[in-house]
Amino acid sequence: MSKDCGKLDEAGNTALHSDYPDKLNNIIHLFETLPEDERRETIVSYAENAKKQEPRKDEQFDLVDVRKDEECMDTVGVYLQVDENGKAHIRMTLGPEVQTLTRAMTAILCKGLEGCTPQEILDLPSDFVTRIVGAELVRIRSQTIYYVLTRIKGICKVYLDRQRMAEVA
């Protein structure tokens, strides 16, 4: 029943005015157009495709943050590479105990934030989460839903702080 999330992303593609990056905006729009049962199916599809967001062999990263936090049942790794154009590329690894919704948000955020700058990621409001997963799931799983976004923003902040320190030195 796993769907190819690339096709799902394209299904949400529409010209919308938004404060969100285009790729993330397309995903948000897709979820907003789905009835609740299809929304949950699509969340499961993204969760099943989370492995595609893991680091690839021989990839080099500017920062790597692998740890187990109180907010998560298992170890989560966040890998950040910033290319010569200043665009961020995020990969993540998730342990086997990580919940379906957290896996889905990992895939959604890695895909939706691809090509943003670290500063754009830091500035991203978190209000889009309920637009994707729905208010009911946010109420039930609020900590784990925002966990992935917090970790991604955290690694971007460390990257930017290091860049500023290097410029001063």
Image: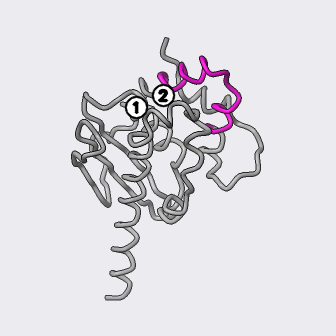
* Magenta region: 27-46
Q: Residues within 10 Å of mark 2 (few under 14, many from 20)?
A: many
Whether the magenta-drawn stretch holds residue 37 is answered as: yes
Tell me what residue is drawn at x 49 percent, y 11 percent.
Answer: 1
Label 1 secondary element:
helix
Give the residue at mark 2: 46
Question: Is residue 19 or residue 72 the one in the foreground?
Answer: 72
Residue 136 image-quadrant placement: top right
Task: Tell me residue 34's x, y (percent).
Answer: 67, 24
Give the residue at mark 1: 50
Label 2 secondary element:
helix
Task: Say whether marks 2 and 1 touch (CB < 8 Å).
Answer: yes
Question: Is residue 156 or residue 145 the one in the foreground?
Answer: 145
Task: Tell me residue 122's x, y (percent).
Answer: 49, 62
Whether the magenta-drawn stretch holds residue 43 is answered as: yes
Task: Tell me residue 64's x, y (percent).
Answer: 27, 54
